[in-house]
Amino acid sequence: MAEQPRLIDAIDIRTTTRNYDPTSLAEDHIRKLDTTISAVNTLSGLHIQLISDCPDVFAEANASGHFRNANNVIAVVGPKESPEAYEQAGFYAQRIVLDATLYGLGTGWVAGSWDRQAAAQRCSILPGEELYLGITIGYPIDQAQLLRSDFKELREIQSKHRPSISLAEATPDMSAAEVEAAPDWFKDGVTAALKAPSAMNAQTTRFFYDAATGTAKAFIASDASGRFLLNDLGIAKLHFQIGAGGGTWQWGNEASFSRP
């Protein structure tokens, strides 16, 4: 019997999808996504929602060629003006993305290439909440068959085409000797984090291992500020946690990670 794919496999094969099949989401996929989203909302306190069959949200982006047949979106909704919630939104919504990948679905984080107002009108946004970002979701044209059948082949394809900074660049406050001496879980965590999506593919999250305490930390290597950087930080933290084989992050820039 073939081994069931895991979240680390989803990290290895996930890519941003722009070209979608026009087929509507199947009821089985909608049911699975709703179950995952409900569990994530309960755990995080966010108000993430799946909005299917909403071509108006992507009418301009589809017409311009930025997307093709984008028609469904995961709306990431949470508390207004909450830096911690912005980070949590990245962490927890990316967990939904990875599950969707294992379901054979394509996804893509969106910030400006959609009609935010049209999306907000289709959401349930409670007083004290705001719509942060969206995630397109559907059946990818280019990789549909591979997603359904061969994770190994798709992993090999992704390893050749995914642009990324190096391990050394992701650990700028560590010497080469310190990186080499760091435990495998740390290096595996950073490697997984380097496969995380980020705004404009900027990859602004960096990592450090403290040999004295046996803990890691993540920090933003940018003078800029804003929710997108915090969202990216949360996404990178989730990938790191999965790659490291488990552990617990504290929230915030330069917050620590500890292993069980």
Image (cartoon, rainbow, N blue to C red):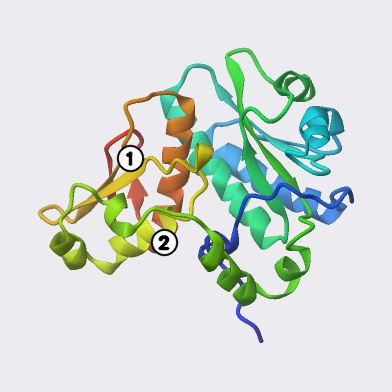
Whether tag 1 and tag 2 are in contact, CB under 8 A, the answer is no
Badge 1: how crowded within 10 Å, few (<14), some, or many (20+)? few
Q: Which residue is mark 1?
A: 250
Q: Nearer the viewer, residue 168 or 136?
A: 168
Residue 51, by quadrant, is top right
Is residue 4 visible to the viewer in this orientation of the structure?
A: no
| Disc 1 residue type (three-letter) | Gln
Q: Nearer the viewer, residue 183 or 41?
A: 183
Q: Position of residue 174 (x, y in %)?
A: 17, 52
Considering the numbered disc 1 on the image, is that residue within a helix, a strand or a loop? Answer: loop
Residue found farthest to the bottom: 1
Q: Where 116 sits versus 239, above or below?
A: above
At horizontal 73% and vertical 18% (from top left) the residue drawn is: 117
Q: Nearer the viewer, residue 45 or 241?
A: 241
At horizontal 71% and vertical 60% (from top left) the residue drawn is: 103
Q: Position of residue 110 (x, y in %)?
A: 63, 35
Badge 2: how crowded within 10 Å, few (<14), some, or many (20+)? many
Q: Position of residue 106 (x, y in %)?
A: 70, 53
CA gap, disc 1 to disc 2?
A: 17 Å
